[in-house]
């Protein structure tokens, strides 16, 4: 079930370095939210804070609240592994497990879920549902036992999306999911993102403003006040408004290509 995310006063550090400062926003359920902004302004760092992936880096920490379904993800009683199960992630480069078949890649996350024994029928049902959900079923249904690495880059990325949705997360985070793909594969992923928002809350970082305009409902523009200063959220608005009539002159300058 898709959920909204309420973010208040979030600061994100790497050791003593404040990378992202003072973020407030509500990410809507069943919508696509895009983060744009120049390199180094903290988009990826902020995205990773949304499922506590950030804290796998030693010394990294988050202040503030990130609330999903009434639960602060950073509450000391919350298990980060459970958070990452609820809030899945797809990375820049497709990363199927190299030794596994297509079938086993899709159910890898489910198998990891503690104590859950997966029947053959349940595994088959999940694999078909997830591959259909990732618009990949028709291309791979006759070779499920072949290695995931044998697929094209775009197919591998859809396989990674199938693996992420197999555990039925509430939110799907995507960190520049098309940056390693050709235009046709990119377009297939963008179509898929449109479909996935019916079932999931989607958050995508993209360096491509046209992509943000094409796929997202809401957009957050991040920027740096100056080199060495923390990144911050300049503007958060419905995508149509942001691209037609932004509130902030810095957003206007960025989307019209004057910097970044
Ligand atoms: P963006 O995604 O907008 O390009 P990042 O989130 O990657 O920005 O980076 C934001 C800031 O945090 C940058 O100053 C970057 O150098 C720093 N940073 C990113 N990852 C790390 C890390 N693992 N350790 C220390 N600093 C980092």
Image: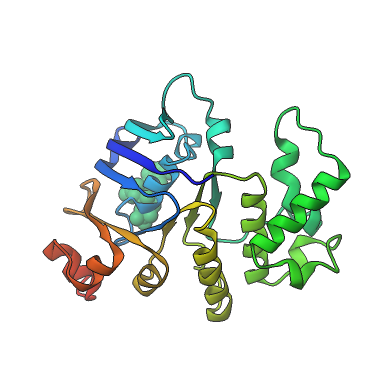
Image quarter hosting the C terminus: bottom left
Q: Residue at x 67, y 49 (%)?
A: 166
| 79 over 222 or under it: above or below | above
Residue 37 appearing in the image: yes
Q: Position of residue 73 (x, y in %)?
A: 43, 31
Q: Position of residue 36 (x, y in %)?
A: 33, 61
Image quarter hosting the N terminus: top right
For the residue pair 195 and 17, the one nearer the viewer reads as 195
Q: Is 37 on the left-hand or right-hand side of 157?
A: left
The residue furthest bottom is: 184
Q: Is 102 on the left-hand or right-hand side of 15?
A: right
Q: Is 27 on the left-hand or right-hand side of 99?
A: left
State the image quarter where residue 162 is shown.
bottom right
Q: Residue at x 81, y 38 (%)?
A: 118
| 97 over 150 or under it: above or below | above
The residue furthest left is: 249
| 14 over 196 or under it: above or below | above
Q: Residue at x 75, y 39 (%)?
A: 111
Q: Position of residue 94 (x, y in %)?
A: 61, 61
Q: Position of residue 164 (x, y in %)?
A: 62, 50
Q: Is 104 on the left-hand or right-hand side of 75?
A: right
The residue furthest top is: 77
Residue 100 appearing in the image: no
State the image quarter where residue 207 is shown.
bottom left
For the residue pair 128 and 18, the one nearer the viewer reads as 128
């Amino acid at each position: 079930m898709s959920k909204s995310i309420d973010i208040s006063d979030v600061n994100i550090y790497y050791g003593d370095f404040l990378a992202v400062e003072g973020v407030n926003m509500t990410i809507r359920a069943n919508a696509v939210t895009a983060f744009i902004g120049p390199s180094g302004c903290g988009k990826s760092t902020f995205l990773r804070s949304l499922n506590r992936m950030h804290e796998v880096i030693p010394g990294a920490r988050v202040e503030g609240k990130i609330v999903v379904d009434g639960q602060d993800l950073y509450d000391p009683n919350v298990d980060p592994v459970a958070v990452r199960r609820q809030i899945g992630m797809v990375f820049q480069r497709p990363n199927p497990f190299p030794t596994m078949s297509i079938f086993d890649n899709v159910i890898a996350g489910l198998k990891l879920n503690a104590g859950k024994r997966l029947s053959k029928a349940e595994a088959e049902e999940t694999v078909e549902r997830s591959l259909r959900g990732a618009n990949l079923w028709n291309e791979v249904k006759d070779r499920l036992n072949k290695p995931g690495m044998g697929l094209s880059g775009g197919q591998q990325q859809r396989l990674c999306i199938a693996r992420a949705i197999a555990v039925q997360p509430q939110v799907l985070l995507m960190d520049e999911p098309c940056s390693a793909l050709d235009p046709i594969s990119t377009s297939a992923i963008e179509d898929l993102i449109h479909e996935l928002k019916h079932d999931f809350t989607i958050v995508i970082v993209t360096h491509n403003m046209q992509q943000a305009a094409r796929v997202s409902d809401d957009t957050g523009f991040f920027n740096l006040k100056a080199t060495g200063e923390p990144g911050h959220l300049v503007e958060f608005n419905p995508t149509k408004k942001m691209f037609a009539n932004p509130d902030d002159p810095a957003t206007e300058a960025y989307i019209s290509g004057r910097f970044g």
